[in-house]
Amino acid sequence: MRHRRDQLGKDLLDLLLSRWGTLRTEDPVPAADLQRADVSFVPTAPLPGFLGLLARLAVNPCLFELFSDAPKREAFYGCMRKFLQWRHAILKRLRAAEPTCWMLCAARPNLALTELGFTRDARYPAGVYTVGWSFGVVILDELPLTRDTLLLRLLGRDRTRDLALDALVTASLDPTVLDDIVGLFVDYSALSASEDDPMAVDLSRYHAWKEQQRAEGRLEGRLEGRLEGRLEGRLEGRAEALRRAITGLCQALGIPLDPVREGSLTNRDPEALQHLFDTLVRERAWPS
């Protein structure tokens, strides 16, 4: 499950940053033994304001290493070694500003922060810690609940992630970007359904927001066509993925799928399938 959550983080950073620079995931780092960075990013254009704190972290060439749990000290050493190798290579190839490395952690690694001398960095909001050589740690569940930190908090877990998802609809994002972000979470939620620690997400506020926008006539003309066209194309595949995920989850939970239930899966739209999936994850039983 950790691999799934970390891959979601890589895809989200790719979605948010790739238009403004060169982004690679699983980027090989030159070394005696091959190492790979979760995400490397080299900006080639000014980063837009809607990225908030993420834009400030990515203003120079950087590595992002993602951790869905609190990393131990050895993980810090591995990231430091990887970063120094990558920094050497990037400065040989580009006449760039000083590169940085950011460890994005869903939980606080108390012991490692203390032992390795990380301190709170006043240049950034609460939750950001650095040492004196362009190496930092972002504790996602310590970030303040502001618009500036919203997109980074999507990389967190449980309540941190859920609060960020709820706040998406008030963030004044381009509807296309909003739909792409929501689509990622729906896809990964479906894919994780049969795992021991499924990643169920509540997107009810997003769906309510979309209906309100439509009712008030704000999704119209080319804007609505662009949003709905992208959504429909994604939802066709998503519905099938959700049906497979629900089938797998029922098998894992020992819930029988009789012909009536199988027929209901065929007739439900993606939103209804998502609701059923969330109910199964929460209740561990077919809804009555």
Image: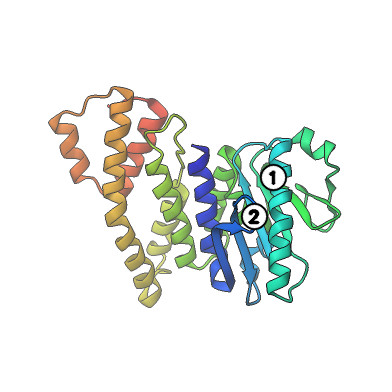
Residue type pointed to by label 2: Phe
Classify residue 270 as left or right of residue 116. left
User: What label sits on residue 64 in the rendered view?
Assistant: 2
Classify residue 32 as left or right of residue 236. right
- Image coords of residue 13 (percent x, y): 56, 58
Badge 1: residue crowd in 10 Å (few <14, some 14–19, many ≥20): few
Classify residue 69 as left or right of residue 247. right
Residue type pointed to by label 1: Gly
The answer, for residue 56, to whether it is visible in the render is no
Q: In this rendering, which labeled residue sits more in front, label 1 or label 2?
A: 1
Q: Residue furthest top?
A: 254
Q: Nearer the viewer, residue 73 or 241?
A: 73
Total marks placed: 2
- Image coords of residue 123 (percent x, y): 83, 58
Residue depicted at x 35% and y 37%? 277
The answer, for residue 227, to whether it is visible in the render is yes
Residue depicted at x 72% and y 50%? 81
Protein image colouring: rainbow
Q: Residue furthest front?
A: 32
Counting residues from the N terminus, which is met first, the one under dot 1 or under dot 2?
2
Residue depicted at x 45% and y 38%? 200
Q: Residue furthest left?
A: 259
Helix, strand or loop under label 1: helix
Badge 2: residue crowd in 10 Å (few <14, some 14–19, many ≥20): many
**Contact (Cβ within 8 Å) of mark 1 with mark 2:** no
- Image coords of residue 92 (percent x, y): 72, 71
Q: Which residue is mark 1?
A: 78
User: What label sits on residue 49 in the rendered view?
Assistant: none
Distance Cα–Cα, label 1 vs label 2: 13 Å
- Image coords of residue 99 (percent x, y): 74, 64
